[in-house]
Amino acid sequence: MQYCYLPVKKSMLPSKKCPVCQRPFTWRKKWKRHWEEVIYCSRRCRGIRTKTT
């Protein structure tokens, strides 16, 4: 069985705003299973947030 994957335009991907740097970031394939739990755009922002608390 062959699957035909259609490319998705980046403008159609869901996005969120990082609470640390206030920059928008978009959905990535590696976040496919836990997109609802993703809060920060990068490890750097996650690290900054944990240091300030």
Image (tube, helix red, strand yellow):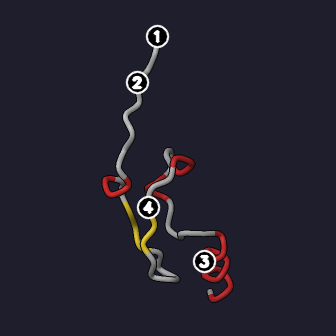
Q: Which residue is mark 2?
A: 4
Mark 4 closeness class: few <14, some 14–19, many ≥20 residues within 10 Å = some
Q: Which residue is mark 4?
A: 26
Within the image, what quadrant is residue 24 found in?
bottom left
Residue sitting at 50 percent across and 53 percent down? 28
Q: Residue furthest left?
A: 12
- Which one is closest to the eye, mark 3 or mark 1? 1
Query: Where does the image place residue 27, in percent across and percent down from the top left?
Result: 45, 56
Answer above or below: position of 26 versus 8. below
Q: Quadrant of residue 42?
A: bottom right
Q: Earlier in the sequence, mark 2 or mark 3?
A: 2
Q: Amino acid at mark 2?
A: Cys
Cβ–Cβ under 8 Å for marks 2 and 3: no
Which-is-in-front pick, marks 2 and 3? 2
Q: Amino acid at mark 3?
A: Cys
Q: Residues within 10 Å of mark 1 (few under 14, many from 20)?
A: few
Amino acid type assigned to the residue bearing label 4 in the image? Thr
